[in-house]
Image (tube, helix red, strand yellow):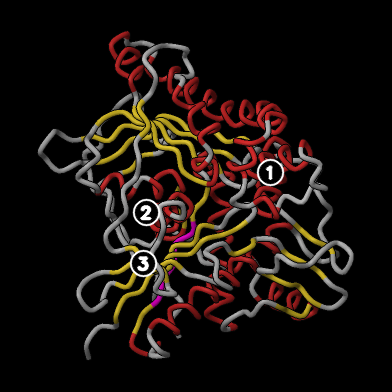
Amino acid sequence: MSPKRRVHLGIDYGTSSSKIVFRDYGAPGGETAVVVVRDGSFRIPSRVCLTASDLLFGDEQRTTENCDIYESVKMQVAAEVSNNPRHYYGPLKAMPSGFASVDLAALTVWFLISEGHRAVAAYLKGRMDLISVGMTMGVPMAFFKDRQLRSTFLGIPRRAWMLYRGEGLLGSALLRDKALWVLDKYPLAAVPETREEEVRDWVRSEGEAAMWWPFQSPAVAPGRYAKVDIGAGTSHSSFFQIFGNMGIAKTGMAFLSAASESVGMDAVDRAIAESEELGGDCLALRGLEQSILQKSAKARGALIPVRDGIYHAFRKGWIETHQKIKQSVAEVQSWRDVKLFVIGGGSLIPTIAEAFKVHPAGVNPMLQLVVLEQPPELVRADAAKVSKDELPFVTVAYGLSNIGLSIPEALTPDQVPPMREPTQRRKRLDHEDIYAK
């Protein structure tokens, strides 16, 4: 019997919206990565809406007039587990009776897995019997290096996977009573223990995933880099080194730092909407930010404190890096001309992206902004071309869609002492058939 065709879901479970890319390892003509499109958009709302009888997923149209809306569930989980309110913008919202924030997160990821499954089925014209499906979910690197948060966020996709394998596909609506029933049937404590080397098959840091394509790209040389990911509700930064020699295959990455701030594009849109007296309708601004900023000095002024808040995540990352390298004057000097990647929604607004060219240590020269080129195998499920404006949003999901160890070794800040070059290849296992019936 021939082995099944491998398809792997990369799930970027976001604060405000999520993105999914699936990788078809047996595609005719070579491996293909496909961006999942729902209702014409690659963005899938992460919010959970609760009516009198149902939990609703992926619904961006509902308002507080006809349901209770739970936004930023992912970050509320982090704030509750770490007892750190900085992970969540605004006051924590009480969960509905019978549910914890981790429950809503697991149900949301079950819905995202199901959306990925439906996209794969449409892509393969229903021939799901011929394939083996797996998934990996991203978490902020700042969470991944924290053992308590990593354990919590490891449990979310593993529980969601059990729901998917045991209960089938989840649609956009789930009866509240049934939700309580399935959560009781698949409690978090019932998920089998996972060995340390298997962790990255379930969850991988968003920083590592975002840099998968730059690591593979011949256009990106070994060296010292910084990355800023400006999402909807959060901004993340990291400083890392790609090891290798010019003309020789890259050998790995080591992240020296990871920092996170609960401010992002939602705050950008809110500032613009309030300055322009748009009634706070942030969703109506999506994609129009730059044109408004070009026309309105008032909007540009309102953006300054938000931009500074996002930049603070960058500075926090540098301070952590500096603490590791300060013993060596040569290392400090070498990190002054670090090259910079900016991804996420904020990368499309020059007013924000250009701010990161200023080194957080206040030294010259200005940092060089590296522009990601289009991966050759990346396409949209609706056959439309992935535009240059969409690429910064799907970079993390694209990296997560890989099975196994494509980067020989990627060390997080808690794993690597100051500038130890990776030397060993970490064993990787696939979990597609762990819960096969």
**In the picture, which quadrant includes the N terminus?**
bottom left
Residue 136 belongs to the span the image colors magenta: yes
> Which amino acid type corresponds to the residue marked 1 in the rendered image?
Asp
Mark positioned earlier in the residue sequence (2 or 1)? 2
The majority secondary structure of the magenta stretch comes to strand
Residue 297 belongs to the span the image colors magenta: no
SS of the residue at dot 2? helix
Give residue 198's position: percent from left, percent from top.
39, 58
Q: Which residue is mark 2?
A: 197
Question: Crowding near pointer 3: few (<14 within 10 Å), some, many (20+)?
Answer: some
Residue displayed at 48% across by 29% down: 354
In front here: 185 or 369? 369
On screen, 65 above or below 426? below
Give residue 76's position: percent from left, percent from top.
71, 49
> Which amino acid type corresponds to the residue marked 2 in the rendered image?
Glu
Disc number lying in front (2 or 1): 1
Q: Is residue 55 left or right of residue 293?
A: right
Q: Which residue is mark 1?
A: 269
